[in-house]
Amino acid sequence: MENKETEEGRIYSVVAYLTIIGSIISIIMNQNKKNNFVAFHCRQGLGLCLSYMLIGYFFFIAGGGHVDPEVVVTEISFFQSDMVYFPFWIFFGILFLYGIIGAATGKKNIAPIIGPLFQKLFKGLGN
């Protein structure tokens, strides 16, 4: 049997994983209620979104840092190759799905490898 806090926070917990805007919406909506379940998923969702954006930005800069449709590129840098991008997308896709499924089922699934860091970095959110 689930407690009331978990049941009330499911929707905002799932929304926290849907882009950076979803994370911000969940954080704002949780400011008055201070639901610990939602706060946990806000920290995880925000951390995943920011990590995804920062690592993607690194790949962009390391790969040349510009996109010019008029220039035909004959060499593709390592960071712009599919061998790097696909594992990156798959890794973060799995982490996002893991968090969404946990939030929808009322569990606090901490993201493997980087989840504990998010809980420490964003410990002020929601508490």
Image (cartoon, rainbow, N blue to C red):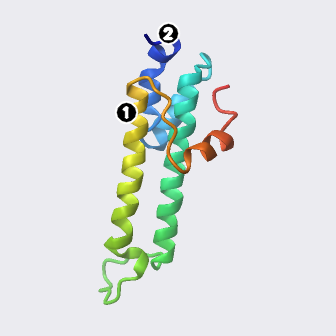
| Residue at numbered disc 2 | 4
Q: Residue furthest bottom?
A: 74
- Between the residue at mark 1 and the residue at mark 2, the CA separation in whole angstroms equals 19 Å
Q: Is residue 38 above or below residue 68?
A: above
- Horizontal and vertical percent position of residue 113: 54, 51
Label 1 crowd (10 A; few <14 / some 14-19 / many >=20): some
Image height check: is 91 above or below 23?
Answer: below
The amino acid pointed to by label 2 is Lys
Above or below: residue 59 compared with residue 23: below
Kindly identify the amino acid type of the residue bearing the numbered disc 1.
Answer: Ile
Element on which disc 2 rests: helix
Mark 1 / mark 2, whichever is N-terminal: 2
Q: Quadrant of the C terminus?
A: top right
Residue under label 1: 101
Quarter of the image with the N terminus is top left
Q: Is residue 115 above or below residue 63?
A: above
Residue 21: % across, % down: 47, 39
Q: Is residue 82 visible?
A: yes
Of residues 76 and 71, the one nearer the viewer is 76
- Residue drawn at x 32%, y 86% as measured from the top left: 73
Q: Position of residue 6 (x, y in %)?
A: 49, 17
Q: Is residue 81 left or right of residue 119?
A: left
Picture disc at residue 57: none
